[in-house]
Image (cartoon, helix red, strand yellow):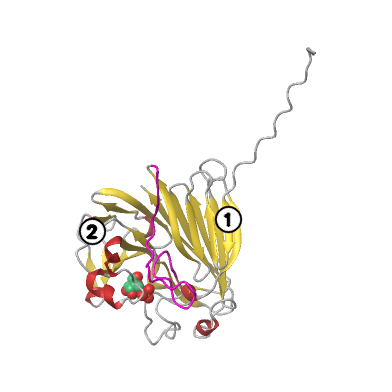
């Protein structure tokens, strides 16, 4: 029957936008963007990002370097990915509160809590961004270590995956009644094709402390940094966190690293000799395929008064 006033078809309810898939399996949290298949995996030990598979030019590939010898059972800091360094970078002098902590502090060997995910539409289509939140406090940190640094703190670490980029941010809050000094650093191991054809721009003419030469203060030559040997430097860019950094391979830009409130940048590659003294670094030839670009606030102590907070972030972008 042809009904003249046949009601139009019921407007089909708009399908919900595809949501990012987030799974917590054991002590690992994974998130996958349905739009691109990009993914991130975070180990609760240290809230260490173990893997970031990013998409560029139709190539979905791992963008972080992770040692084949990485200890992932919580007994050791992870060799690779993005370890979180707090409250001290490196080894402390004997006269400071962090003196008894191991190198790079207690955050990277504590078991963080997964606080959940938040889905924002980000800059792209719905479901094209996901944020994973992780928390640590003095009460939940490795007790053997928090006993060595008796201050009350909370950390909120946010890992945001978007098409072509990964952002990690940290909020440090003094939850106690006494001020404390700290360093913080995101110890990012970027995967590179070949360190000998890798260059870094954005740090030319910047002052740095050269750990390879007894922390001697030097100034980087103008232009790009190339790598020909062990490199272990704390750069203090004149423009602080404003100074963007680009990592290139054979002259082609690969990674953009931008920072919020993390004024310093550590650049590290152990090279062919030192790598043999890093037990969990495997394969040893792997030094050719990694470069640490580590945004942080480490060249001087930050002080947090009770109830004060500090926030810093890095944004890694595929170029
Ligand atoms: O970030 C550079 C650095 O301080 C190097 O001196 C080297 O020690 C590297 O960190 C790795 O430190 P880790 O304690 O993880 O072996």
Q: Which mark is residue 179?
A: none
x then y, percent, for residue 173: 55, 70
Q: Quadrant of residue 223?
A: bottom left
x then y, percent, for residue 261: 43, 61
Q: Residues within 10 Å of mark 2 (few under 14, many from 20)?
A: some
On screen, residue 182 versus residue 211, left or right, reads right
Residue 62 lies in magenta, yes or no? yes
x then y, percent, for residue 11: 71, 28
In the image, ligand 1 is in what quadrant? bottom left
x then y, percent, for residue 266: 33, 66
Q: CA distance from mark 1 to mark 2?
A: 38 Å
Q: Which residues are magenta?
A: 58-84
Q: Main secondary structure of the magenta part?
A: loop
Which residue carries the number 1 mark? 22
**How many discs appear?**
2
Which residue carries the number 2 mark? 225
């Amino acid at each position: 029957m042809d009904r003249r006033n046949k009601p139009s078809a019921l407007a089909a309810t708009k399908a919900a936008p595809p949501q990012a898939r987030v799974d917590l399996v054991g002590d690992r949290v994974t998130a996958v963007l349905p739009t691109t298949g990009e993914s991130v995996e975070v180990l609760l030990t240290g809230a260490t990002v173990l893997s970031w598979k990013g998409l560029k030019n139709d190539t979905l590939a791992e963008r972080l370097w992770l040692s084949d010898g990485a200890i992932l059972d919580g007994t050791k800091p992870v060799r690779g990915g993005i370890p979180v360094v707090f409250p001290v970078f490196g080894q402390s002098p004997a006269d400071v509160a962090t003196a008894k902590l191991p190198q790079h502090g207690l955050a990277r060997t504590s078991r963080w809590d997964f606080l959940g995910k938040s889905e924002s539409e980000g800059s792209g289509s719905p479901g094209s961004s996901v944020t994973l939140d992780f928390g640590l406090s003095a009460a939940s940190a490795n007790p053997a270590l928090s006993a060595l640094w008796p201050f009350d703190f909370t950390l909120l670490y946010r890992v945001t995956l978007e098409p072509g980029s990964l952002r990690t941010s940290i909020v440090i809050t003094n939850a106690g009644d006494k001020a404390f000094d700290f360093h913080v650093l995101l110890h990012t191991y970027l995967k590179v094709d070949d360190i000998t054809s890798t260059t870094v721009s954005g740090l030319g003419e910047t002052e740095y402390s050269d750990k390879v030469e007894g922390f001697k203060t030097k100034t980087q030559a103008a232009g790009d940094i190339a790598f020909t040997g062990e490199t272990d430097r704390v750069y203090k860019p004149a423009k602080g966190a404003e100074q963007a950094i680009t990592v290139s391979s054979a002259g082609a830009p690969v990674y953009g690293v931008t920072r919020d409130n993390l004024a310093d940048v550590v650049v590290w590659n152990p090279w062919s000799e030192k790598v043999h003294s890093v037990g969990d670094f495997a394969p040893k030839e792997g030094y050719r395929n990694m470069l640490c670009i580590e945004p942080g606030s480490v060249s001087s102590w930050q002080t947090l008064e009770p109830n004060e907070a500090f926030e810093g972030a890095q944004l890694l972008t595929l170029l």
